Amino acid sequence: MARPLTMFEKIWAAHEVHRDEDGQSLLYVDRHFIHDGSRTPYKQLADRGLAVRRPDLTFATPDHYVPTTSRNFADVDGEDRKDMVASLTRNTQASGVTEFGLGDARHGIVHVMGPEQGLSLPGMLILCGDSHTSTHGALGALAFGIGASEVAHVLATQTLWQRKPKTMRVLIEGELGAGVSGKDVVLALIAQIGVNGATGHAIEYAGSTMETLSVEGRLTICNMSIEAGARAGMVAPDQATFAYLKDKPHAPKGKAWEEAVARWRDLPTDPGAIFDREVFLDASAIEPMMTWGNRPSEALPVTAAIPDVAMVEDPAQRRVLQAALDYMGLKPGMRLAEVPVDYVFIGSCTNGRIEDFRAAAEILKGRRVAPGVTAIAVPGSGLVRLQAEAEGLDRIFIAAGFEWRYSGCSMCLAVNGDMVPPGKRSASTSNRNFVGRQGPEARTHLVSPATAAATAIAGRFADHRALGV
Amino acid sequence: MAKFETLVATAAPLDQRDVNTDAVIPGRFLRRKREDGFGECLFRDLRFHADGTENENFVLNQPAFREAKVIVANENFGCGSSRESAVFALYDYGIRCIIAPSFGDIFHNNCFKNGLLPIVLPETEVSELRAQAGTMQGTPFAIDLQAQTVTGVDGVARRFEIDPFRKRLLLAGVDEIDFTLGHMDKIAAFEAAR
């Protein structure tokens, strides 16, 4: 009998065009997403006189530099940002690549758009010049982020050289408590294994918790795999995956759909397959989480207090934690739920999907954002925004005092002009709490959408479960 | 692409773990054009105060390390964002080699596309080298890619492991796209067989 294989190994093997004598694999890319940070790779192609090899497998949307206050190109902030956005349109048109531009309802953050359009499918190798490409692995794909030179390489050849990473299974078992989301799970995981806990590994998330989690919750968890250093994050496709993908615009239709599902059923890891590492997480013990430091691993339950970092033994760790406390303006022993906030941001490729806005709206319904708090909701795509509006969620957000914006990366990395001012504190549903991430000297705390909503109402970090929703 | 064969240069110690690529180059500089250079953006918010004056405490601003071409870093250097501008910034500033116990995966890959050599050594050896760089300021390190050795101030040649494929391309200065264009028949056959 053949050796049992992991899902990762199956997908890897199916995409290996060639293996170099020195052990690197040339992998074939099924789907390549590009965004408005693609000017440099396109220039690399132009300088060599090369064309895009497979424009039909390449899809574009400008997400990083676009305004979220309107859909007008004229509102793109400044000439240099305008050039980033305009060059994507110019380059995709010249190369025959489909672009979901600013005025298109299908516009969105690339990692929201791909799954939503059915462009990301089980068994695929999916690449994008963005570290959060691991998101797409939630559908049973191998997906990871690449640099600009690699984007140019994929555009020119539809392939990428890679050395096979190790595999890690994260087994998550047990029932999640009421109101505990995928975001809380992944923050708890990173707190447990650290920001380089999965470096050099492709993670497969498995176990009863993952099986019952929504596809959107899985997308959130896979999204933040990179925050534990992982090359990729993936979840075996199952009935929930197929139900999510069926009838999506680019998903196979009719007989082709049935055939595809039959193939996808062979993807999950074989019983007895061996992973290089196994990690276990008890889902029933996870509470709503938030970060307090400048690495995603500095996460604690919202109900906890800041730890005494002086007790940390490793001097390199202690220095990082002390610097984080200073930057964040916090002291050991402070209760997180007493820390006041200035900004609340709900959106991003981590938490910009319809389920996220539903969860937040449930908390916000009939309530008001605390005085002095600036709260913005940025749907992950035009279609998420339309769906939310069809469900009346926009009216709940607006009545509560949120700004209801248009799709884009926005305040997650603050390169479009949406920024948290210096010294201000933000509760953000995004993925990175790095120094300066949301603007110079901005203080970012990562939370789930429900926690962000409860925090907006309280004006300080809050346990949304106490609101009795 | 620029070759990397040998290097003899000052090494600067950067004893901070988990230095992310947002710290190497903040997001507000990512819309620069490649041809405009990224050197002045390197570690911008660590090298400079908000008012634009230099932070004299940052290692690259100290007189002994202004000419450094090597950084001896700590665990997980270059984690986070895939921004290749982090490598552009290091390279344009003049850095040609980074030594660390581990790197962020995407950053590590990006280095090789730009002639920047990332060297992985065990934590204890990196600590020794970092200490040597700090105490014997300005005494050069020697790096030999063909021999896979780093020689610190103590004269001890420490051997490092490196992906043989990456080594081959870096030694020859082979551009990866050009290299792959030599495999287009295989790619076409793979596409035809699907």
Image (spheres, coloured by chain):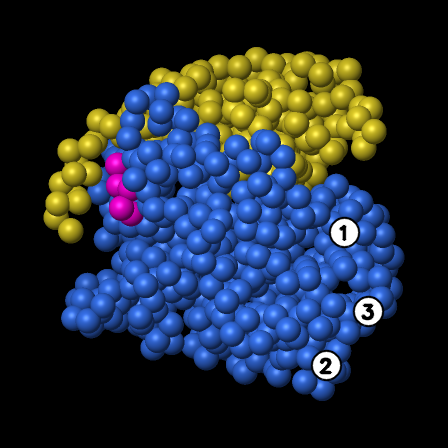
Chain colours: A blue, B yellow
Towards the viewer: A77 or A439: A77
Q: Amino acid at mark 1?
A: Arg
Dot 2 crowding, Cα within 10 Å, few <14, some 14–19, many 20+: few
Expressed as whole percent of the image width and height from the top left, the position of residue A155 reads: 33, 37
Asked which quadrant contains residue A464, the reply is: bottom right
- For image coordinates 72% across by 23% down, the residue present is B60
Secondary structure beneath dot 2 equals: loop
Query: Is disc 2 in the same subunit as disc 1?
Result: yes
Along the horizontal axis of the image, is A65 left or right of A29?
Answer: right
Q: Which mark is residue A366?
A: 2
Q: How far apart are labels 1 and 3 at the CA level?
A: 19 Å
Provide the residue span drawn in magenta: A53-57
- Determine the secondary structure under disc 1: strand
* Marked residue nearer the N-terminal end (2 or 1): 2
Residue A323 place in picture, x, y as percent: 79, 46
Image side of residue A455 versus residue A172, left or right:
right
Vertical order, B34 against A293 (above or below): above
Three-letter amino acid code of the residue under disc 3: Ala
Residue at x 75%, y 82% (from the top left corner): A466
Residue A250 locus on image (x, y percent): 30, 60
- Disc 3: which residue: A370
Depicted A428 relative to depicted B103: above or below: below
- Nearer mark to the viewer, of 2 and 3: 2
Q: CA distance from mark 2 to mark 3?
A: 13 Å
Name the mark on residue A443.
1
Give the amino acid type for the residue marked by disc 2 in the picture: Gly
Q: Nearer the viewer, mark 1 or mark 3?
A: 3
Residue A118 within the segment the image draws in magenta? no
Q: Judge whether residue A54 is colored magenta.
A: yes
